[in-house]
Amino acid sequence: MMMDATLDVGPDVVDASVDVYVDAPPQRAIWVATPTTLFNFDPVARTMTRVADFACSGEPMVDLAMNAQEQLFGITSESVVAIDKTTGACTEIARGAQALPYGTGFVPASSLDSGVETWLGYVFTTYDAIDPDSGALTFEGNLGFKAGNFQASGDMVAIAGGNAYLTGMGLDPMTGDGIIQFDPNTGAATQLLGVTGVPAMVGLAQWAGILYAFTVSGSVYRIQLLDAGPAVQLLAVSYDFGDASVPDAMASDAGDAGEAGDAAMEAAPSLLPLTFRGAAVTTRAPSQ
């Protein structure tokens, strides 16, 4: 008797095929803003690529934030916006708000008691939740006394399954910004990890568990958190301005100022004509 060789593909087999599917890994990118322009920083290749100028009703960009879906959001001088990562176009979420947080980031669901990914941020020492649909602010807490005399300098980042960090500025400008570890549920500092000797670290993100800071003076730093305190390394970064004109301060290195700066250039940070204002990375970025 001939046996039927047809396989019965039941629900278990279908489920197994679904289990094989794995979400695509996140783009290897930290998104960085100047007041006018969006950049993409590759933390492995150490390249900074100009993406586009912002179209945000003429309002300068103050900070960026990115969720697990790699959707980009921003805080301008007076608005909460969604940002197109390709064109730099802003879609207004809320406008005319006062005392907007300037050091913000999405905190992964695994780091919050609520189990829900949330956009959170600081204005000075006040810690607010930001609704990405309405722009509404909800008070969540305060930085507290364990930060000493420090208040938010410019940015924060939370590592999935790990800690949350904030750059803070103190009363003595000679010490530079501090790195503060904080409770992402309440915004309260848990400890001041040390000072960096670098002022105005207004952008902060992480990749593979390493912190990257971006300053008002246009510098990029790699920060490792050691028992002795933050170990800060100034990075040489290759810049690609694409079809944009080379900034005047780089004209001598890249050719005539009127030529397109589509060749990557490695520049000493002290020569950069850029002024960074914020940074963001997806909450799915690798933590080690």
Image (spheres, rainbow, N blue to C red):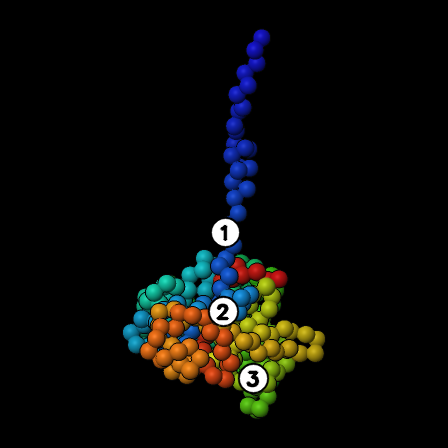
Circle on res. 198: 3
| 259 or 82: nearer the viewer | 259
Occupied quadrant, residue 90:
bottom left
Q: Does residue 210 appear anywhere in the picture?
A: yes
Q: CA distance from mark 3 to mark 1?
A: 36 Å
Occupied quadrant, residue 138:
bottom left
Asked whether disc 3 touches disc 2, contact meaning CB atoms under 8 Å apart, the reply is: no
Q: Please tell me which of labels 3 and 1 falls first in the chain.
A: 1
User: Circle 2 is placed at which residue position?
Assistant: 47
Between circles 3 and 2, the one closer to the viewer is: 2
| 95 or 261: nearer the viewer | 261
Going by the numbered disc 1, the residue's amino acid type is Ala
Residue, x 42% and y 73% (percent of image)?
A: 33
Provide the secondary structure element on which disc 2 rests.
strand
Q: Is 134 rendered above or below residue 103? A: above
Q: Residue furthest top?
A: 1
Q: Position of residue 197 (x, y in %)?
A: 59, 85
Q: Please tell me which of labels 3 and 2 falls first in the chain.
A: 2
Q: Position of residue 1 (x, y in %)?
A: 58, 8
User: Circle 1 is placed at which residue position?
Assistant: 24
Q: CA distance from mark 3 to mark 2?
A: 21 Å
Tell me if 146 is positioned left or right of 255 in this view: right
Going by the numbered disc 2, the residue's amino acid type is Thr
Provide the secondary structure element on which disc 3 rests.
loop
Tell me if 112 is positioned left or right of 50 in this view: right
